[in-house]
Amino acid sequence: MTNNEYLLHYVWKYRLFDRADLQTMDGQKVDIIDPGTHNTDAGADFFNAKIKIGDKMWAGDVEIHPSSGDWTKHGHHTDESYNSVILHVAERVKGVVRNQKGVQVPQMQLIVPEDVRKNAAYLLNSKSSIPCKNHLPLVERGVICAWMVEMGLQRLERKINDIFTHMARFNNSWDHSFYVLLVRNFGFGLNSDGFERLALSLPLNCIQRHSDSLFQIEALLYGQAGLLYDDIVSDDYYLQLRKEYGFLKHKYQLKPIDGFFFKKLRVRPRAFPQVRIAQLATLLKQSDRLFSSILEREDYRQLWSYFQVDTSDYWHTHYSFGKESERSRKYLGESSFHVILINTVVPMLFAYGRKTGQEKFCDRALQILETLEPERNAIVAEFAVSGISPVSAFDSQALIQLKKEYCDKRKCLYCKIGNQILAR
């Protein structure tokens, strides 16, 4: 859909045109009682509209185009699903249009007010990454707050839909779905794709069969990550891992991924892939009932305790294989824990609550987001400069949704903030 079509839909939806003396192209008076419900799926643009044409009240659908010729161009004249259209609205009207039954459809010209068109052009053509940046201080706080709530929920919905898609691949296993999402998010952005490939290459049940041995879990993870193929490294721990992995790889007929998927550039040593995998191995060893362990922990303190994992001794003096460093424990930091909560625990709890009808898990997920501090990233910083400062992780997630799904895609006409600016 073009920006002009977006604009026409917006103007119709909010009735931002001159409604005095509206007429069809054949001169019948038009009174719009209800413009209808906006439809973004297949079919007419607006459903269940109520429009008085002449002296007769009509209930049905409305189709909107920049040009009346688009009706035929889009094949509506041969599509029976458009037989319920009671009014065809176009910016430029020439000739008549008929539905699949051959019945002529009433047409009306829609004239976009110049001030609305000017404001829309400003937003849609803005060079700023936040198109309405300079207008944000003028938008009512109530509008912003309400839209933030909707954005936060939209982001959660997107995440749980992704989870349900994954579950279909894993025989609807909550544990396996949680495992893949958890491992992915141990990549913390830069290495997320590599970690997800690792999880998909190593079935959870392989790890569960060795839940009594941290060393074997490490061998499986490092081996499948393609990180045990460096012939230069010669310390005992590395060689033992390599030997153990060779046995397990043959036993389970595993195919490792390539180690080049993991990046170290611009990564702090404590966040090196080898360290993250060591933390992950300890976490996976804690329980073979992975997701159930999360469901049983009812508050932040209990979850924090569960994720407070240390690594095996080798990693107390190493950040990567074969390179000794000053001794330090490699606990998962609290800021990293927050990332795991926001991107793994919260969406899984919400998805589980939604799927099983247990609202307490949805409530718990939202409570976690609302009590966590907001994330610190470029998107949050940019909105803060523009006057929108999040107070919780729910708010920062809302801003990420707003930026990625509306600002970046220039969907200003579908944004409540953009709506208020356009209507000024």
Image: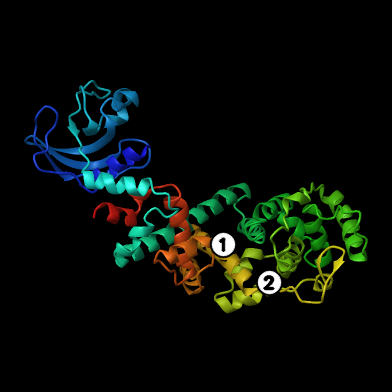
- Helix, strand or loop status at disc 1: helix
Q: Residue furthest left?
A: 55
In the rendered view of the protein, which quadrant contains the C terminus?
Answer: bottom left
| Residue at the (55%, 75%) spot, across then down | 298
Quarter-wise, where is residue 140 in the image?
Answer: bottom left
Tell me which amino acid carries mark 2.
Answer: Leu
Q: Is residue 22 visible?
A: yes
For the rendered model, the colour scheme is rainbow
| Residue at the (23%, 24%) spot, across then down | 97
Residue under label 2: 332
Distance between the alpha carbons at the discs numbered 1 and 2: 15 Å
Residue under label 1: 343
Horizontal side of 106 relative to 330 (left or right) equals left
- As drawn, 45 above or below 312: above
Horizontal side of 17 relative to 290 (left or right) equals left
Where residue 197 sits: x, y (%)?
Answer: 69, 50
